[in-house]
Structure formats: C-alpha cells, structure tokens
Amino acid sequence: MRFFYDWGCDSPFWCGNDVARNKFDVGPIEPEELGLNADISEQLRSLGRWHDTALDWSDPLGPTPWQPEESDRFQTAVKELLARVRSELSQEYEIIWEGDL
C-alpha cells in the first residue's frame, strides 16, 4: 500500500501492487475500507486538508506558502500518525510512505 497525500485528496492510501488493485481498484482508498478506526480516519483527513495548504492554489507552479518549520511540523505529524496506522493494520498491509514536500 502506497501512502502519500495528493493535492485535493484527503486519503493518503493508494494501491501499490496488483493484489491491492484487484481488491480496491484505482484511486485513493478510504481509511474505512482498510478497517481503520474513526479517530485515525479523521486525523488522516485532517492532515490531508493541512497538506493542501502547502499549495498556492492561485499559482500552483509557484513556491509553497509554507515556511520550512511548517513543513517540518507536517512531516512529523504524518510520521506519528503513520506509526499508529501501521500498528492498527499490523501485518495485513505493508505501508510505504512516499510523501515528502
């Protein structure tokens, strides 16, 4: 399972192989489809909304409005939540984080 946030998408889960594609099809996979609890699901969506503030939507090719400190805070929050996700999903899924700003 690939884990990264994409612009305008609040779920960071994407199929990483044919087995996952056969089970979930294409596009983002909702946290509930993986069996994650409501608290983690909402935190994942909250981070997705936060992630979207890193893009200047009026000038998408321009620089991020984030200062390096905010990027660091975001990366830390993602790493902490990803640890919870991996713990909750245990061995059922291999979660590969592909996201850096």
Image: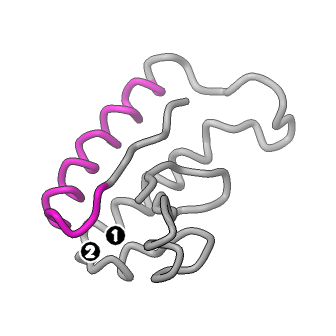
Per the model, the C-alpha gap separating discs 2 and 1 is 6 Å
The picture places residue 59, in percent across and down from the top left corner, at 86, 35
Quadrant (top left/top right/bottom left/bottom right) for the N terminus: bottom left
- Most prominent secondary structure in the magenta stretch? helix
Q: Residues within 10 Å of mark 1 (few under 14, many from 20)?
A: some
Where 50 falls versus 68 (above or below)? below
The residue under the point 49% across, 49% down is 4
Q: Along the line of sight, which residue is nearer the eye, 60 or 30?
A: 30
The residue under the point 58% across, 26% down is 66
- Mark 1, residue position: 41
The quarter holding residue 63 reads top right
Quadrant (top left/top right/bottom left/bottom right) for the C terminus: top right
- In what element is the residue under mark 1? helix
Asked whether disc 2 touches disc 1, contact meaning CB atoms under 8 Å apart, the reply is: yes
The quarter holding residue 27 reads bottom right
Q: Along the line of sight, which residue is nearer the eye, 23 or 60?
A: 23
| Residue type marked 2 | Leu
The picture places residue 58, in percent across and down from the top left corner, at 86, 41
Q: Is residue 78 magenta?
A: yes
Q: Residue furthest front?
A: 18
Where 34 falls versus 15 (above or below)? below
The residue under the point 66% across, 51% down is 7
Question: Can residue 39 be seen by looking at this rendering?
Answer: yes
The residue under the point 51% across, 81% down is 22
Mark on residue 36?
2
Mark on residue 96?
none
Where 45 falls versus 7 (above or below)? below
| Residue type marked 1 | Ser
* Magenta-colored span: 70-94
